[in-house]
Amino acid sequence: MRNSKIYLILSLLAALSILSGCSQDKSNQGVAGANDTAATQATSSTKRMPNDPSLKSLYIQSCYGCHSSGAAGAPRSGNTEQWALRLQKGLDTLLANTKNGINSMPAKGMCMNCSDDDFRALILFLSGEAE
């Protein structure tokens, strides 16, 4: 009985540490001036949605959790400054990174049923290149 309680506590702690990987970065909160633009972009990132209903569904299911808030270092949706260097690598490289995973992003961004065309459309939406 005691071992099962310890196992439960350790499991809960492990789950919390995993979930904290997708927590919102609060390092810029409370700083006025130059960070006002970043705060505005963060707010607008959480409200941005694709116009196409099927793309919107994929975005909400697979991208929104991290790309709306910048969690785990994800470039925020529509933040052209954060996407600029990535876009310089070209769409083919971004597609490969999406499919294979990069940094904290898992392979396919957890969108296992997404096609290459879906990923291209999502990348273009996220980067602000398409709405």
Image (cartoon, grey):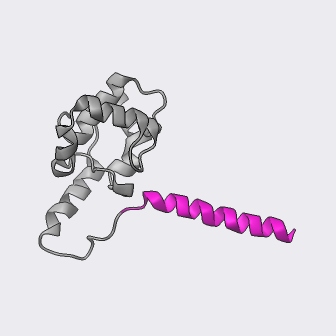
Res. 57 visible in picture = no
Is 27 in front, or is 101? Answer: 101
> Could you say where residue 127 lies in the image, as x and y percent from the top left?
22, 41
Residue displayed at 54% across by 58% down: 18
> What x and y, as percent, mark residue 74?
33, 51
| Residue depicted at x 34% and y 55% | 73
Say left or right for 74 vs 129: right
Look at the picture and state if 110 lies above or below 113: below
Q: Residue 39: horizontal and vertical position, in percent? A: 21, 63
In the rendered structure, which segment of residues is drawn in magenta?
1-24
Q: Quadrant of residue 22?
A: bottom left
The N terminus lies in quadrant: bottom right
In this orientation, which residue lies closer to the viewer: 27 or 45?
A: 27
Can see residue 67?
A: yes
Q: Residue at x 35, y 32 (%)?
A: 96
Question: What residue appears at the point 19 percent right and 33 percent down from the top-left corner?
Answer: 130
Q: Quadrant of residue 71?
A: bottom left
Q: Residue furthest left?
A: 33
Provide the major secondary structure of the magenta segment.
helix
- Residue 76 falls within the magenta-colored stretch: no
Residue 18 forms part of the magenta stretch? yes
